[in-house]
Amino acid sequence: QMQLHESGGGLVQAGDSLRLSCVASGGTFGIYTMGWFRHAPGKEREFVAAISWTGDVSYYADSLKGRFTISRDNTKNTLYLQRDTLESEDTARYYCAAKKYYNVQNMADLPPGAMDYWGPGTLVTVSS
C-alpha cells in the first residue's frame, strides 16, 4: 500500500513562485504514472498535469499549459509541480495521484475512484 503526501502549500503572494512536492512511501514509486489535480473553492476538481512513470513524457491541461511544470525524481520517490508567477485563481487544494503504468494523457479523464492512490492534498492560497 503506497502512501502519498503533498507539501509546499501555504499563503503566498501573487507573482511569487511555488514548488509543490509529493513524496511516496511504502510502494514502488517508479511504476506509477503520477498526476496533479486541484480543487478550488466553488469549482470542480481540475486536472493540472501528469507525468509518465519514467518521467520522460508529461501532459498538461490545455487551459494551464505553459503555467505549470511537472517533474519527478524516482531516486527520491518524489513528484513536483512548479508554478512561476502565481495568480489568485491558482488558489486551491492541490492533490497528487498515482495510477500504475497508465497512459499519461488519459490521467486527465480518469475518475477519482479509479486512481490507485491519492494524497490528502496541500492548500495553496494566493493573496493579491
Image (cartoon, rainbow, N blue to C red):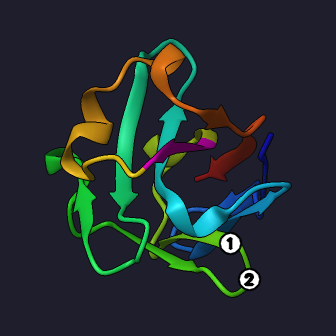
Mark 2 surroundings within 10 Å by alpha-carbon count, few (fewer than 14), some (14 through 19), many (20 or more): few
Extent of the magenta region: 95-100
Mark 1 surroundings within 10 Å by alpha-carbon count, few (fewer than 14), some (14 through 19), many (20 or more): many
User: x, y (%) of residue 21?
Assistant: 69, 67
Give the main secondary structure of the magenta stretch: strand
Asked if the residues shown at circle 1 and circle 2 are in contact, with their CB atoms under 8 angstroms apart, the answer is: yes
Callout 2, which amino acid? Answer: Lys
In front here: 61 or 18? 61
Q: Secondary structure at mark 2?
A: loop
Task: Look at 64% across and 64% down and name the residue there.
Answer: 29
Q: Quadrant for residue 73, please give it.
A: bottom right
Residue farthest along the right direction in this orientation: 26
Left or right of 65? Residue 99 is right
User: x, y (%) of residue 60?
Assistant: 24, 56
Residue 76, compared with residue 50, is above or below; it is: below
Count of numbered badges drawn on the protein: 2
Q: Which dot marks residue 103?
A: none
Residue farthest along the bottom direction in this orientation: 75
Q: Is residue 102 magenta?
A: no
Task: Look at 44% across and 16% down and name the residue there.
Answer: 43
User: x, y (%) of residue 36?
Assistant: 49, 49
In front here: 29 or 48? 29
Q: Which residue is mark 2?
A: 76
Callout 1, which amino acid? Answer: Thr
Task: Look at 30% across and 81% down and name the residue there.
Answer: 56
Task: Look at 78% across and 34% down and name the residue there.
Answer: 120
Q: Quadrant for residue 117, please give it.
A: top right
User: x, y (%) of residue 57?
Assistant: 25, 72
Q: Secondary structure at mark 1?
A: strand
| The N terminus, quarter of image | top right
In front here: 78 or 20? 78
Q: Which residue is mark 1?
A: 78
